[in-house]
């Protein structure tokens, strides 16, 4: 349900596996976050986790979202370690009877991952590395669901 | 009688280490903060900064908490994933 | 960009193709609608289109959404003809620099497809066939973007 | 001198046909509606119902419009895809 991985993953294969055999699910929303190159300004991302704690915390949040949005299922895949531009960083999948719940749950989970899940992101660029803080918008987005 | 201390994100860069054993085990989280800060003023300032969370044996702790031998304490800076 | 098809499609392969080679896209949202079985109450869906007109109309709406939400790209795949429970009916993919735009565009496109695109849906169940009208919620959802 | 008429969704079921040529071509969309309705009262009622759109040569038309030979006219009931 929650997977941290230091290996590249294949988003299409994840979606196929998630969508299989769902005769009662009407709606699957998914979000895929890719490392942006920012036209050369970012050469790589580095993601750090506190592995068991991070998985457990994300799992608690997913369980809450599953109840709140009446999901049939949810899945989070998050890269850790070094990530090249264009590579998938995160994928969230949600399954529900109807589209509104699937969309909102996916949106809510992404907002959580951006500023509240125990993950730390470093950008490596021509000017050297810098730790990325959540933006004002990230914080406001996450607060929408409180 | 040690506690294991873990630092993440920018706290690692400030302290220059990621994990260390502190011995003897301080009696509390606040006592541990003092021990770490006494040796490293930059780390003391960073740990007192906004948005630093403490995690004791994989549970988030607000404020202070007693420590026992073999506890694992992690200090977490503001989070940003995705 | 817009595809109507009377053949089953493979959502994972669509996502993989859409996500390929995007070093500046930070965010890909997708929605996959599946035919629900409704625990035996629906045995099949039938989707009718006015093919060239339907593709052209959806294309106009996608072009507007692309500008409005500053998308890099968007893709709509819609089944026509007979569809069995559990099979994909519709898939919408959106690519943007940031997640908010990708999510909103995907949501907006789905609302459009549900009640404003030239498509007609018939449900075949034990009680016989019936044409599906958009629900009050579908109409309200689509009106959010006006 | 004919126009091609297409029906979709429930309009098909009401009329019992999907496509037919109407000859001679009526002068306008409204005249075509009258011609179709004269032969089939159920279709007349359905075409006058809420949410029926007319499409002339693949362009949506509000209200009336003149028709010419070889025009394609489609009547569309309320839409529901996805």
Image: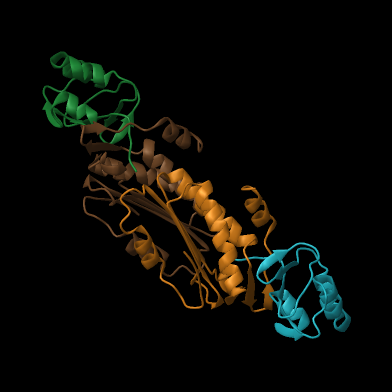
Chain colours: A brown, B green, C orange, D cyan
Q: Position of residue B10 (x, y in %)?
A: 23, 29
Q: Position of residue D1 (x, y in %)?
A: 76, 84
Please determine whether, in this image, residue A59 is positioned above or below residue A127.
Answer: below
Q: Residue at x 26, y 32 (%)?
A: A131
Q: Residue at x 54, y 60 (%)?
A: A97
In the picture, the quarter occupied by the N terminus of chain A is bottom left
Q: Residue at x 34, y 41 (%)?
A: A57
Q: Position of residue A9 (x, y in %)?
A: 27, 57
Please determine whether, in this image, residue C47 is positioned above or below residue A29.
Answer: below
Q: Is residue D35 visible?
A: yes
Q: Nearer the viewer, residue C1 or A25?
A: C1
Q: Nearer the viewer, residue A145 or A135?
A: A135
Tell me: B82 left or right of D10: left
Please determine whether, in this image, residue B78 is positioned above or below residue C137.
Answer: above
Total number of numbered labels? 0
Tell me: C95 left or right of C113: left
Q: Nearer the viewer, residue B51 or B71?
A: B51
Tell me: A109 left or right of B35: right
Please determine whether, in this image, residue B65 is positioned above or below residue B60.
Answer: above
Q: Position of residue D73 (x, y in %)?
A: 72, 75
Q: Residue at x 35, y 39 (%)?
A: A117
Image quarter of residue D20:
bottom right
Q: Is residue A100 visible?
A: no
């Amino acid at each position: 349900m929650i997977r941290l991985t230091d290996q590249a993953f294949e988003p299409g294969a994840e979606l196929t596996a998630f969508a299989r055999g769902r005769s009662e699910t009407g709606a699957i929303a998914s979000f895929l976050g890719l490392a942006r190159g920012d036209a050369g300004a970012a050469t790589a991302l580095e993601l750090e986790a506190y592995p068991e704690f991070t998985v457990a915390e994300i799992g608690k949040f997913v369980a809450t979202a599953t109840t709140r949005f009446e999901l049939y299922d949810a899945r989070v895949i998050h890269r850790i370690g070094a990530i090249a531009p264009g590579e998938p960083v995160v994928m969230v999948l949600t399954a529900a009877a109807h589209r509104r719940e699937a969309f909102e749950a996916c949106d809510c989970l992404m907002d959580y991952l951006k500023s509240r899940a125990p993950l730390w992101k470093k950008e490596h660029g021509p000017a050297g590395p810098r730790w990325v803080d959540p933006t004002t918008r990230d914080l406001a987005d996450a607060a929408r669901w409180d | 009688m040690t506690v294991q201390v873990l630092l993440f994100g920018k706290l690692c860069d400030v302290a220059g280490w990621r994990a260390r054993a502190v011995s003897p085990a301080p009696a509390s989280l606040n006592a541990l903060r003092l021990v770490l800060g006494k040796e490293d003023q930059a780390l003391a300032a960073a740990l007192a900064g906004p948005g630093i969370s403490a995690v004791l044996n994989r549970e988030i702790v607000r404020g202070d908490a007693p420590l026992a031998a073999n506890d694992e304490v992690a200090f977490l800076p503001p989070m940003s994933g995705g």
